[in-house]
Image (cartoon, coloured by chain):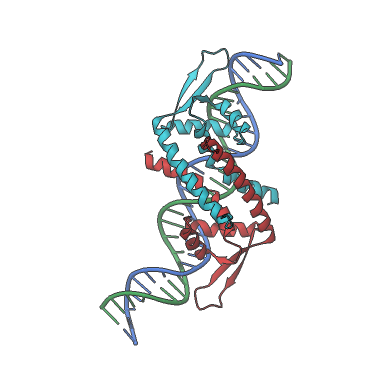
Chain colours: A cyan, B red, C blue, D green
DNA sequence: TAATATTAATGTGTGTTACACACTATTATA
DNA sequence: TATAATAGTGTGTAACACACATTAATATTA
């Protein structure tokens, strides 16, 4: 296994799990999948479309999101997702976990934070 | 799937990947596995021993760590791990990725950061 | 003191889960 | 007619949890 492979596999694991957080953060208003990809990409988070679509479906099956087809517009049919109230609840919980975890890890990797 | 299951599975994914970072952060000096578990636990990171041991071996097989048995002491034999120079390099790279990623995600989940 | 339980320390094996990657499919638009 | 927009499926991989095994030292109790 080469250096680049090693690094990218570790980076992959690092990003893993944070995708849900990123996605949920964008769903205050209804957004469709393809738009999420570009939107997140613009903000520095690169998510594969073929990762995102199953993720959205999974979150919907868990009751975190609901979706609605929009076939009215003069464009390809789009499936808009938004958080349910349950999803909002979940989002706040994992957001807290994230922030806690970040501060713990940051204190581990940068012991000379203070002053 | 119940609420608690959903949450803990998401949290699991969130923690996943950060374990390597946490572990590497503790290996400036040689440390043995069991000690890592307790040490990280004290600092707020709970890692299962049966997660850690394979992880350490994996990192060693990738050249990130080297190990050395200590059978001299009047205790059970301990396998001490420390970063190689390559490991140090990798650590710095993924640390940077982590910090970048954290700031991106934090800006996503807390749009009202400034001032 | 002897017997036993607990802690310290490392290890293996299996199942689950999410992500990447490759692919298909359809409709607008350039 | 080709490319972008939009959604989907299927397979492989890799890491983690969980359960279990093993040995040696220490603590507890008989």
Q: Position of residue B87 (x, y in %)?
A: 66, 58
Where residue A99 sits in the image (x, y, percent)?
A: 49, 45
When asked about the image quadrant of residue A12, the answer is top right
Q: Nearer the viewer, residue C11 or B12?
A: B12
**Marker count (numbered):** 0
- Horizontal side of B62 relative to D19 (left or right) equals right
Which residue corresponds to the image point at 50% horizontal and 64% vertical from the top-left?
Answer: B34
Q: Position of residue A60 (x, y in %)?
A: 45, 30
**Identity of the residue drawn at 50% across and 59% down:** B40
> Is residue A1 found left or right of D7 in the rendered image?
right
- Residue occupying image coordinates x 55% and y 50%: B18
Residue D29 image-quadrant placement: bottom left
Q: In which quarter of the image is the N terminus of chain B?
A: top left
> Residue A62: in sight, yes or no?
no
Please determine whether, in this image, residue A44 is positioned above or below residue B81: above
The residue lying toward the viewer, choosing from D14 and A41, is A41
Q: x and y percent of residue B4 in the render?
A: 38, 42
Location of residue D16 with respect to A42 vertically, above or below: below
Location of residue A61 by image quarter? top left
Q: In what quadrant of the picture does the C terminus of chain B appear?
A: top right
* Residue at x 40% of width, y 42% of height: B5
Q: Can residue A58 be seen at all in this image of the molecule? A: yes
């Amino acid at each position: 296994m080469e250096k680049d492979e090693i690094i990218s596999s570790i980076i992959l694991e690092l990003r893993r799990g944070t995708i849900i957080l990123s996605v949920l953060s964008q769903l205050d208003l209804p957004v469709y999948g393809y738009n999420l990809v570009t939107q997140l990409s613009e903000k520095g988070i690169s998510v594969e479309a073929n990762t995102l679509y199953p993720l959205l479906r999974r979150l919907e099956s868990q009751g975190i999101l609901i979706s609605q087809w929009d076939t009215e517009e003069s464009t390809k049919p789009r499936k808009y997702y938004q958080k349910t109230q349950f999803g909002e609840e979940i989002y706040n919980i994992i957001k807290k976990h994230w922030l806690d975890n970040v501060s713990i890890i940051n204190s581990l990797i940068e012991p000379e934070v203070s002053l």
